[in-house]
Image (spheres, rainbow, N blue to C red):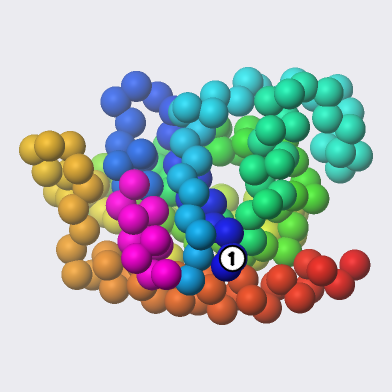
Amino acid sequence: MYKLKVISSTVRPGRKGPIVAEWITAFAKQHGEFEVEFLDLGEIDLPLMNEAVHPIMRQYEHEHTKQWSAKIEEADAFIFVTAEYDYSYPASLKNALEYLVHEWAYKPVGIVSYSAGLFAGVRAVMNLKSDLLSLKAISLHEMVNIPALQQFVNEENQFVADERLTTAAGVMLKQLFRWTKGLKVIKEDK
């Protein structure tokens, strides 16, 4: 079974990323095509990049980098759950991406974006997709964009998706599985 890592990108107090990530994680598990693991950058707490040698060399000095590398290396696919901060994605995700190079390559990425307003995080997605290109990660066209996030958060602080969001998530997961199968061949052909 293919391994899918769902990565929640926000780290600030009061963040909503983890509840959105918990929803897509549960949805992906129900989908049944992946072994799914939720990774919360707020809990992983990577420091700002502090490796002396460029990550392309894979000469990691620090234990936190070695652990992060192992988690990402074992994945076959990703879903990034990202907020939109100042027209882009959070610095915590940028930092997590830049710790590694080879580990992201030839793996598909689904994106779940959200914002407090009507743009649904799509400006963050555009910046994230351009950065993923340099890592040879393949971002899917199919994604889940959540506008006005608070309307989907209930009194128990749980994310409750509507039919439009669950349909989008199903389409994204179907394509993520398809791309995972295809890219596995490319990744192994070194």
Mark 1 highlights which residue?
Answer: 2
Q: Is residue 147 left or right of residue 113?
A: left
Does residue 30 lie above or below 58 as drawn? below
Query: Which quarter of the picture shows residue 133?
Result: bottom right
Image position of 134 with respect to 90: above or below: below
Q: Is residue 115 left or right of residue 140?
A: left
Question: Crowding at label 1, few (<14), some or many (≥20) Cα neighbours within 10 Å?
Answer: some
Q: Image quadrant of residue 108? A: bottom right
Residue type at numbered disc 1: Tyr
Give SS at disc 1. Answer: strand
- Percent from the top left, x then y, of residue 78? 55, 56
Q: Main secondary structure of the magenta part?
A: helix
Residue 62 location in percent, x, y?
77, 22
Q: Which residue is pictured at 68% across the width and 25% down the height?
A: 64
Asked if 169 appears above or below 45 in the picture, the reply is: below
Per the rendered image, the range of residues in magenta is 22-32
- At 47% from the left and 36% from the top, the residue drawn is 40
Q: Nearer the viewer, residue 119 or 17?
A: 17
Question: In terms of depth relative to the viewer, which is nearer, 145 or 13?
Answer: 13
Q: Quarter holding the C terminus? A: bottom right
Q: State the residue at coordinates (83%, 23%).
A: 61
Whole-percent x, y for residue 56 in the image: 86, 42
Coordinates of residue 140 in the picture (x, y in percent): 54, 69
Magenta-span inclusion, residue 147 = no
Which residue occupies the extreme front position in the image?
Answer: 1
Going 53% across and 73% down the picture, which residue do you hit? 177
Q: Does 151 sit above or below residue 68?
A: below
